[in-house]
Image: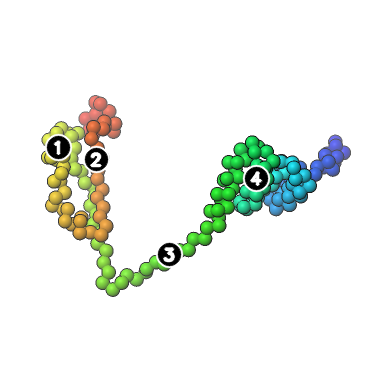
Amino acid sequence: MWMVAGMAVALAGPYEEGVAALKAGKVDEARALLATAAEAEPERVAPHWELGWAHWVANDFAATARAWATVEQLDPAYEDVSFWRQAATTRASLGAVQLQPSSVVVQPDEGARLTVVAAGDTMMGSDLRRGASGLPPDEGRALFEEVAPVFRGADLAFLNLEGPLADDLPSTKCGPTSSSC
């Protein structure tokens, strides 16, 4: 039995050893072995494909895209290579983006002001208990007239509505026989 296993190891080349290294999580070793296999057999698709995966695991997406471009040249229909090459190209492009943080003003200008107005738990009306008499007149057009100048005068304004603004939507919150909704 040992002899058979030894013969299998002796028959394994850089490709098989590279795949085994990749499966074992030895990414740098896998990349070196698979690169050797791809150089030795440039027309064979499998070493280039697996080399691409080794580069992917190492987050070297530019190298991944190059390996898979070779696969795509050799066999355009191989394992959705077009999709994967494009994914690697996109990741390589995104990795090349250098974001520069913008400056943040930590001290406001002298006299600078920001006005914030917020109101919450605003129920504009409900037909659940009082029917149409529980709704504001004229579909609520004048509901906020008295506070409109306060909201319009703010730099930033929030209003938390406690119900949706919609026409003709069924209520699915409570069952048809509910008396406490």
* Nearer to us: label 2 or label 1: 2
Q: Earlier in the sequence, mark 4 or mark 2?
A: 4
Name the quadrant containing residue 107: bottom left
Q: For numbered disc 1, what is the local secondary structure?
A: helix
Q: Dot 3 corresponds to which residue? A: 102
Between 152 and 4, the residue placed more toward the observer is 152
Q: Earlier in the sequence, mark 3 or mark 1?
A: 3
Q: For numbered disc 4, what is the local secondary structure?
A: helix
* Nearer to us: label 4 or label 1: 4
User: Is there CB contact under 8 Å for labels 4 and 3?
Assistant: no
Amino acid under label 3?
Answer: Ser
From the top left corner, tell me how far across and down residue 84 is, in percent: 60, 43
Q: Earlier in the sequence, mark 4 or mark 1?
A: 4
The 10 Å Cα crowd at callout 1, few under 14, some 14 to 19, many 20 or more, is few
* Nearer to us: label 4 or label 2: 4
Q: Dot 2 corresponds to which residue? A: 165
**In the figure, is residue 162 to the left or right of 85?**
left
Which residue is located at x 71 percent, y 50 percent? 31
Res. 68 mark? 4
